[in-house]
Amino acid sequence: MVTPDTMAIWLSLPGEGIDFQAGQYVNVTIPGLEGTRAFSLAGSPTQPAEIELHVRPAGAGRGRDELAARESEGGRQPVLTGPLGRFYVRRSAEKPLIFIAGGSGLSSPKSMILDLLESGYEEEITLLHGARRPHDLHFADIFRELEQAHDNLRYIPVLSQPEEGDGWTGEAGYVRACSTAGSACIRPISAVRLR
């Protein structure tokens, strides 16, 4: 568990693993459960034999629990199909990039940012990472370390529901919100100043 309600699962794949592009996902068939579950790949494409998945219980709770149990107990292993999807960074634009992520939606941005930094991308990269409270900011330490190591990365954690006892002095607000029509939109955070 990387937060009280988000689990990170690392799966070792046989042979050379899968050749994937940062931003892609896999469909996972879990023995004993009907249908498949889609999970974004959260790790770096330079590690194709070990894939990282972030899972929240809402909507996939039983699948998450089954996946974790099978991995730890050596039971019948899940079947992965992929990589799938065409969500990726267009490097040819050579412009500053802003990533906005909340909850388990950090998976694809994490993979993309790792890939960009490992490949020497020189434009500015900003990650706005939304969560409710400090303990919900999974992998914050990793992004803070990456920010220290790379002059072109800026990590901005933003809390939507910090409590007085949290001692939070960072940004507060919502990094993502949905309009009444249900489509995704971004509500500006007035205190955040991008370079």
Image (tube, rainbow, N blue to C red):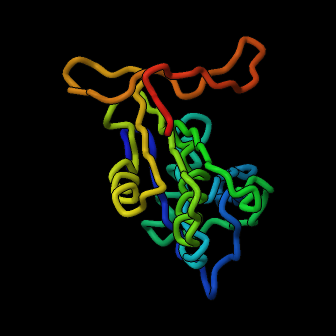
Of residues 12 and 180, the one drawn nearer to the viewer in this rendering: 180
Q: Residue at x 71, y 56 (%)?
A: 89
- How many marks the image carries: the answer is 0
Of residues 65 and 119, the one drawn nearer to the viewer in this rendering: 119
Residue 52 shows up from this direction: no
Q: Measured from the top left, where is residue 159 in percent x and y?
A: 40, 27
Q: Measured from the top left, where is residue 98 in percent x and y?
A: 59, 43
Residue 109 shows up from this direction: yes
Q: Is residue 33 left or right of residue 128?
A: right
- Residue extending farthest to the bottom is 15
Q: Residue at x 26, y 27 (%)?
A: 168
- Residue extending farthest to the top is 180
Residue 186 vs 129, above or below: the answer is: above
Q: Residue at x 62, y 88 (%)?
A: 15
Q: Measured from the top left, where is residue 167 in percent x and y?
A: 20, 26
Residue 12 vs 170, above or below: the answer is: below
Q: Residue at x 58, y 51 (%)?
A: 109
Tell me which corner region of the image, top left, top right, bottom left or bottom right, holds residue 121.
bottom right
Q: Measured from the top left, where is residue 96 in percent x and y?
A: 62, 49
